[in-house]
Amino acid sequence: MSFFKKLKEKFVKGPESEEEKEEQQVHETEDSDDQEHPLETDVDPADTHEQDVTDLQGETETPETEAPAEDGEEYAAEADEEEPVESTLDEKDEQGVEESLPEDDAAESLEEDEKASIASKFKMGLAKTRNSFSTKINDLVARYRTVDEDFFEELEEVLISADVGVTTVMEMIEELEMEVKRRNVQDPQKVKEIISEKLVEIYYGDDRAEEIEGLNENPDGLTIYLFVGVNGVGKTTTIGKLAHRLKSEGKNVTLAAGDTFRAGAIEQLEEWGKRVGVNVTKHSEGSDPAAVIYDGIQSAKSKNADVLICDTAGRLQNKVNLMNELSKVKRVIEREVPGAPHEVLLVLDATTGQNAMSQAKTFSEATDVSGIVLSKLDGTAKGGIVLAIRNELEIPVKLVGLGEKVTDLETFDAHAFVYGLFADMIEEYEEEELS
Ligand SMILES: Nc1nc2c(ncn2[C@@H]2O[C@H](COP(=O)(O)OP(=O)(O)OP(=O)(O)O)[C@@H](O)[C@H]2O)c(=O)[nH]1
């Protein structure tokens, strides 16, 4: 099966292939009970997404009066309304159609809803990158009749201009050349799909998706996430978004205002605490960050919290100070909760390009960074930075900021990312294939 088609099947609901449509028609004729209309249930992921965001936005504006836990309920309620989609999926399933339980179907449908919604978020968030990247790739492909050395040279430039990073681009081009030869591809149009496939392969490298995607959790109690990063990258906003997300998953979340250095940082985190409805442990400006984190841990323990998210100051001017401060904070955390912190998340602003790369280098020298949060990915046309970070620094991207709203934080998923980059091409490709 082609890679574009795989992505479509993974992220977009509804019957995709001719075979599936045929199979579905057979079911329809066999089924004398005419109360369901599976073909009418195609869901446009963009619509689903818009509805989700609108609902959640409404709640965000009045955080004190509405518990974020309702997000999940509302989401489930929406899915319930889409009952017919579940039956479409049943009919698609070749095995055990009769035996499948309604709860299984509902869970399956919800899972598909979620995947479609994730894909549409990546699609929207990566619009700037996609527009620039697609235009350049389409332009390149249109100008070449055959895949030759000049084609690859130009492709190299396109990838470099998307901030994929020189080392990664070189690796990518080499692999593309081999793949094109292996598959004996002559038509430049066909290379688009191979590029998308290689981007995913290069992102994962030798790791499996489960090993590098998603946040680590403590199965036996309090999970602690330590956030690091320079001022202005979107650290506080990301902490607020993550707190909101974890709370809507039913977790008891608490925050610690460990950035005691920057004026206004404590108030900003408190503001987020109020907005999201979670407790914030704070001391006064200028106090010892390790002491705040210590108190945050005691408070989290006493409240039986599931997750504590710790903010820190990001003073890059002096690496020794940064290192000392972060190691002190980490020592306190490790002593109080063995095995913690469960993630040290470095927030980088995607719009700063190569600057983000040098920040990542400095921070990973100062402390063990376990994952990257790439904020403002929606604000750049150079989303290729994701690959450069992962490939050149060997640190996985765990979360991405795809907008300013509280719901605009997504777990990074390399397939959804590539879907976001190639969405237009995937749609075009299908039209061609079907016609
Ligand atoms: N478009 C977009 N804007 C974002 C995103 N994340 C954060 N921002 C915006 O970036 C700006 C800076 O975010 P803050 O959270 O205040 O930055 P910060 O890193 O906490 O700053 P310090 O507290 O100084 O470290 C704010 O206007 C946020 O709304 C994102 O994913 N997309």
Image (cartoon, rainbow, N blue to C red):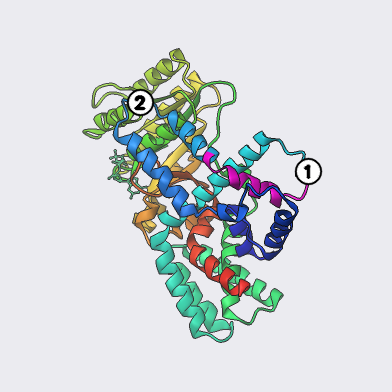
Of callouts 2 and 1, the N-terminal one: 1
- The answer to whether residue 350 is seen in the rendering is no
The structure residue drawn at horizontal position 66% and vertical position 71%, both measured from the top left corner, is 179
Decide which of 334, 396 is in the foreground and name it: 396
User: Which image quarter: residue 158?
Assistant: bottom left
Q: Which residue is mark 1?
A: 96
Q: Does the magenta run of residues contain 83?
A: yes
Determine whether the residue tagged by mark 2 lies in a helix, strand or loop: loop
Direction top: furthest residue: 302
The structure residue drawn at horizontal position 45% and vertical position 54%, both measured from the top left corner, is 46
Identify the amino acid type marked 2.
Gly
The structure residue drawn at horizontal position 58% and vertical position 74%, both measured from the top left corner, is 432
| Closer mark to the observer between disc 2 and disc 1 | 1
Decide which of 204, 71 is in the foreground and name it: 71
The structure residue drawn at horizontal position 35% and vertical position 34%, both measured from the top left corner, is 59
Q: Which residue is mark 2?
A: 277
Vertical relation: 241 (above or below) 354 = above
- The answer to whether residue 16 is seen in the rendering is yes
Identify the magenta region: 81-95
Q: How many tags in the picture?
A: 2
- Residue 401: image location, x then y, percent: 40, 47
Direction bottom: furthest residue: 145
Vertical relation: 162 (above or below) 247 = below
Identify the amino acid type marked 1.
Gly
- Measure how far apart labels 2 and 1 are at the Cα level: 44 Å
| Quadrant assignment for ligand 1 | top left
